[in-house]
Amino acid sequence: MSDKALSSSSRAELRALKWFTLTPALGLILFALLIAGFLWYLNRVGLDQQRQTLYRDIEWAQQSIRLALREDQDAIVASAPDWALADQLEDTRARGREFLQRSPDVMYLARVTPDRKVLWMLPGRGVVSVTRNRTPGAQIEDSAGYNVFHEARASRSPAFSEPFLGEDNELTVELHVPILREGVFSGTVVAGYSLSRLLTEALSPEVRERYQIHLVDQGGNPLVSTSPRTIHETNLGYELPLDPPGHGIRLRAFAFDTRPSLVRSSLVVVVIGLSIASAVSLLLLWRHSRRRIAAEAERDRLFEFSQDLMCVFDEQGNFLRMNPAFDHFFGPDGSSRHLLDLVHPEDREEVRLALAQAAGPRTGAIESIAISFEARFAGTTQWRWLHWSARSDSSKRGLMWYAVAHDVTKRRNAETALAAETSFRQAMEDSMLTGMRAFDMEGRVTYVNPAFCEIVGYDASELLGAVPPYLYWNRQDPSADQQALATVLEGKAPASGFQGTVHRKDGSVRFVRMYVSPLVARDGTQTGWMTSMTDISEPKRIREELAAAHERFTTVLDELEAAVCVLPPATGPGTTPADHIAPLFTNRTFRHLFEHAADFSPLLKATEDSAPGWLPREVLLPRLGRWYEVRARRIRWVDGRPVRMVVATDVSRRHEAEEQHRRQDEKLQRTSRLVTMGEMASSLAHELNQPLTAIANYCMGLSARIRTRVAAGAELDADEMLQALGKTAAQAERAGMVIRRIREFVKRSEPERRHCEVEKIVADAIGLAEIDAQRLGVRIEIDLPPEPPTLNVDPILIEQVLLNLAKNGIDAMRNATAPVLRVSVRVLGGAIDFAVADVGPGLTPEARAKLFEPFFTTKAEGMGMGLNICRSIIESHQGRLWAETNEWGGCTFRFTLPLGTAGASTRVARAA
Ligand code: ADP
């Protein structure tokens, strides 16, 4: 959620909160104002009532005092003429006393003469002493008395004096009533009023109880008071002028108690109490609602801002409410889907079960069930793992789920990776043949793997937690093991490892090799040591056996007559001269024979071009003058390199024997050829005789003709002569060819292979055979392929074979009616096939069995060596010779020769 959205939403919340909190506050204020107004109004009404009462009471008091004074004044005025009769003093006094009895507020009554002398004085009731100036005989000198006296005298009407301080500090006012005797002023009658008495006597006790009443002078200073108490001026008060006595004297009253009545005040108290109680409860309610609103706002914010997915869904899995994180996770249409639709198909059943299980066994009572599960959910882009915690609640609408989910994909992936890693490591540990053991710095074993248990023969439970001496130590003498452990714990174990023994549970002993490395914790502190242990008992045994085998092997090899060596592979043609190759292995014979590398270089040269197999090469070592058969083979050396093993066997003796044999063979072949020629001698003589006779005839004829022509003097016919000479030369040529063939056939020559034409071999052999054939009347038919191939053979030997076979055929057909010898040559696959077929009597079983044995012959002059030699010639050319019986009679002798074989060897090796 963006900051902007956040602030606007919080502003709206604050506004709501303000209204929620202000409304009760306003109500509270309004209520307080109302109550205050009401109380104020009550107070006002009360005060008004009090004031009215006060006014009434004080006015009443004022009237009372005035009435009392007026009454006294009137009484004195009425009585004054009587009292003026000074001679009837006693009588006057009696009347005066009477008056005093009636007016308790009068302190004294006195008669003052016109010259201000007190004539007599009567003290009032309860008055002990009167001011000295008013004692009889005293003259009134004080200003108040003086002034009033003169005022009364001047005005001739009663007058009140100013207040003055009398005896006993009594504030006093005097009423001077002038006495006129026949219109002449004759003094005054004075009534002294004590102001305090006036107040007490004139006012009713109720008024005095309720008010403090003062008499104040013109300046507002209190003169007398009904109560000595000081009263706050704010108290309800009222002031009225008091005339008489006048002189600015005023009556001032203060209400003692302005408090309302008990009933009213308790009503106020109740109202105030209730108001306070309701205000407090309102305040508490307000505070509570404020807290509630704040808490709800917090909760809403938590719901809105939570990064975790929150939602409410019903029993069927329909979403009812979800937070923005939920929408964000599932995309815009996520909330409109069913819960199970969002679950990965593989996890759907599990989620359904979790919800069903929790919702299933509800036993009437509404109980809230908490469940949690993890499943893959369809996020907006991919499947994500969510961990759900949900709590059910039963409402009017049915069962509801309140759920929160958070994305645990990372954790799940990490867990999966960890599990894979753990199982991989477990598999690795279990499959490992190397024993692993860890121990702490004190040597306490903390870990062993299965291979270790296997090596030591104890279970992991027996080994874990073990301390030295360990179970697999040598119990008889653990000193070596202790020593090794001490070395390890000191960190001095060699990096290259060390050997030791393990005493297994079954009593057997195994040899082991151990490597130690420190176990270092993340913080870099070393926590122990890890030892890897390899069982080397078997390798050790094998090594020992191998060593023994090697010794046997080298002994055998050393005793061999053949020279054996192993050479490193040639890095490339010509890169390493054979002289500089250092053999990897040599046996004694080799070392004895070839002291220097140069000595065996001819051997190596011979092996370089050899095929991978054991094809032998025979090499003559000139220094030793001996033949060696060298066999080389590519093998893998102990380190896996391809190397050459060379075995050189001295074959000089065999070589000599073979050479001898070969020479004998050659001699035999030649002898055989000579014999053949000998056999053919008469035929040959006849063959040669014919051309020689013809030559002689031609020469004699020619010389006779020349002589005849010369004698006749005729011209010699050159053409005729040249023709005769040509015929002569042809005859000589024919004889020469026969002689050349015989010479070539019998001449002693080293067997030599060369490229030669099949056609020529056949022509030469048949040319010789034809001499016998003609003599015996045998027809020879030759059948050659259209393009006869070239052969790499010794032509004389093949010719000898062909001639021998042809001669045998011709011999066999001596008595045949239509003797035909058929010589045919065919190319069959990779070989060339020669066949010599006759129509003679064929082979008897005996002849067939012994055909190729030496000296088997049925002929009187025969030697019986021909076929034997023929077969050895053919076989020496890697060919084959055999006889077949013809269907039409007679037999066919066949031999094959490989085409294009026999390489470039200079010598035809004898077949082994
Ligand atoms: P030789 O010709 O000196 O007897 P060979 O070794 O050439 O010696 O022949 C051995 C024998 O094989 C002959 O004596 C003959 O009996 C028999 N033989 C050879 N060729 C034929 C043939 N084409 N038909 C019948 N017999 C034959």
Image (cartoon, grey):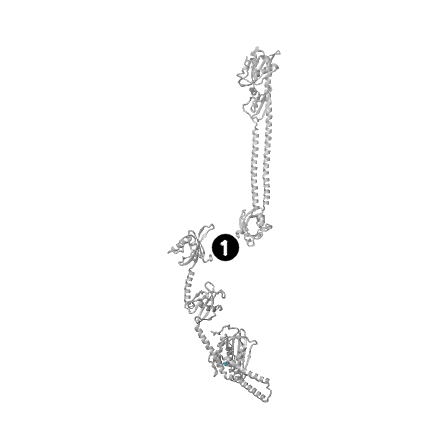
- Nearer the observer, 436 or 868: 868
Query: Looking at the image, how many numbered discs can be counted on the residues?
Result: 1
Rendered view: 707 above or below 519: below
Question: Horizontal and vertical percent for residue 189?
Answer: 58, 14
Q: Quadrant of residue 537?
A: bottom left
Instruction: Answer yes or no: disc 1 within 8 Å of ligand 1.
Output: no
Dot 1 amino acid type:
Glu
Q: Which residue is mark 1?
A: 421
Mark 1 packing: few (<14 Cα in 10 Å), some, or many (20+)?
A: few
Residue lying farthest front? 713
Viewer-nearest residue: 382 or 629: 629
How far across and down, in percent of the image, does residue 430 sit? 47, 57
Q: Where is residue 678 drawn, in percent x and y?
A: 49, 82
Judge whether residue 111 can be spotted in this image: yes
Q: Nearer the viewer, residue 836 or 653?
A: 653
Residue 852 in view in this figure: no
* Quarter of the image where one finds residue 17: top right
In the displayed structure, would residue 824 be above or below residue 409? Answer: below
Q: Is residue 208 above or below residue 603?
A: above
- Determine the secondary structure under disc 1: helix
Q: Residue furthest bottom?
A: 712
Answer with left or right where residue 10 lies relative to residue 432.
right
Residue 225 in percent (x, y) is at 55, 22
